[in-house]
Amino acid sequence: MPNLVAVIMAAGKGTRMKSKLPKVMHSLAGKTLIEHVLDTVNQVGIESPLVIVGHGREVIETRISDRAELVVQTEQLGTGHAVMQALPYLDGAQTVLVLSGDQPLLKTETLQALIESHEAQGVSATVLTAFMDQPFGYGRVIKNEEFVVKIVEEKDASIDQRLINEINTGTYCFKGSALKEALVKITTQNAQGEYYLTEVFDVLIKLGEKVLAYCTHDSNEALGINSRGQLAEAEAILRDRILDHWMSEGVTVVDPSSTFIDADVELTQDVTILPFTRLMGKTMIAEDAVIGPQTSLENCAVGCGSEVTYTMAKDAVIGERCHIGPFAYLRPGTKLEAEVKVGDFVEIKNSWIEMGSKVPHLSYIGDTHVGKSVNIGAGTITCNYDGVNKHPTKIGDNAFIGSNTNLVAPLEVGEHAVTGAGSTITKNVPARALAVERSQQMIREHWHKRKDEIGG
Ligand code: UD1
Ligand code: CA
């Protein structure tokens, strides 16, 4: 049993969210609430915390079962009851960290400081607190000088107690043995008829134990997500935090008010983000790239010095010094090597385009391997779908695809081959050959004069 164990409470329904999803599965800056808490816990060195699940546990399990040990709370009888379910797993743990799955803005450094303060003071319990201008809904922390005397829930508090601004964030550190001893003594004698974890503090104090509060100065960290309004509030706070972080790392964000960057996105010094841009999931942008305006990238990698303008892309890799957009649509499986150009109204799906090739306008390229220095004329379409199956297309290095060519897959166009504009190519084109599929052009001389004669 490791000395430090974490228990994350995530079994509640989240009634106030009014959702079919369990509360902790709602998304914030690209990952679920519970994943935010798990990441923070991992960063203080706890690899596989215990997560108490109950309501909607199948959905939570699918998402996090590989990174946490799940403990089921069949009936949700309160936060104290939630932690009771973990007791069999806590034997021998010196310090038990308890966190709420609905408190995603807690910072790693604060959690680390809470643990250090708790262990340094040698007390039985330490509650993480914050001062809030609007403490409504939170448990209030009543203190006698430095020590905690009691934590009172909003619904149980007297008018005077409700005036207290120091609140319980829902994150705690306990001495393992003390938590075990106190949990079995808590009752349901309160306004909500629940087992409150906060009653552990009363029990410990009555046993003559010392309990302390550790206060974070950033009250945003305490925000508990109970409603959609609080979810939006957390999104705004986290968004500012993420933007401030990247700006301090040397990223230019021209208009923070119209820029959205998910928590797991990675940027590099001297990246520029232009207005109305959204970077999602695990997107990575390398040095000197310029992204936007009006661009949305999800799980994409963009190489050094590339420009991506008015573009939508998902699960795509863009190499160095590429020019993408305006109005490009890169779908999953797109891989563009260095110096590729993808221009306006071009859609690319599941295709690999090698160095220096160009698809400048109005094309659909799907299930295709395009070699190096290929030019694909305007309006080219890879006809990859026969109504039943998808088929591949291969275009060799230095090929030149004439404008408005239909490439009917499966098809190979050899190196240095040329297709005539407007052709529908159904047979493989050998290297260095010209393939034209087009009826002879007809010329009728003096056509206009004839029209005049018949009065057209
Ligand atoms: C709780 C605290 C309150 C604190 C606030 C901070 C108690 C009694 N109150 O109130 O002092 O200010 O958090 O945000 O602890 N959960 C379970 N099983 C249950 C009940 C809850 O796992 O039976 C989980 C929920 O899923 C949630 C967390 O525990 O992730 C907190 O529960 P919630 O109902 O949101 O508590 P609050 O009323 O916000
Ligand atoms: Ca809560």
Image (spheres, grey):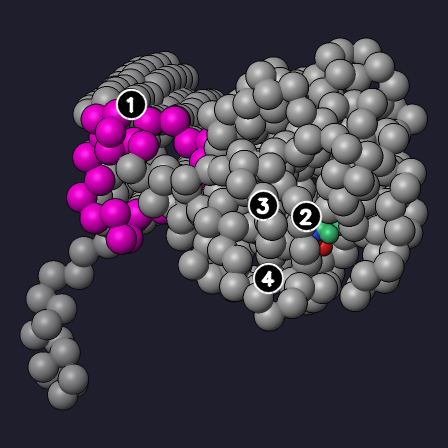
Spatial CA distance of label 3 from label 2 is 7 Å
User: Which image quadrant for residue 292?
Assistant: top left
Counting residues from the start of the chain, the first of labels 3 and 4 encountered is 3
Q: Are marks 2 and 1 in contact (CB under 8 Å)?
A: no
Q: Nearer the viewer, residue 68 or 429?
A: 68
Q: CA distance from mark 4 to mark 1?
A: 48 Å
Of the pair 170 and 249, the residue shown nearer to us? 170
The C terminus lies in quadrant: bottom left
Q: Earlier in the sequence, mark 2 or mark 1?
A: 2
Residue type marked 1: Thr
Report whether residue 315 is seen.
no
Q: Amino acid at mark 4?
A: Gln
Looking at the image, residue 49 sits to the left or right of residue 450; the answer is right
Q: Which residue is mark 3?
A: 143
The residue pinned by badge 1 equals: 268
Cα–Cα span, label 2 and label 1: 47 Å
Q: Quick one: SS at disc 4?
A: helix
Viewer-side label of 1, 3: 3
Asked whether residue 193 is drawn in magenta, I would say no
Report helix, strand or loop for mark 2: strand
| Residue drawn at 49 percent across, 30 percent down | 110
Q: Amino acid at mark 3?
A: Lys
Q: Nearer the viewer, residue 205 or 329?
A: 205
Numbered mark located on residue 161 in the image: 4
Residue numbers of the magenta segment: 245-267
Q: Label for residue 150?
A: 2
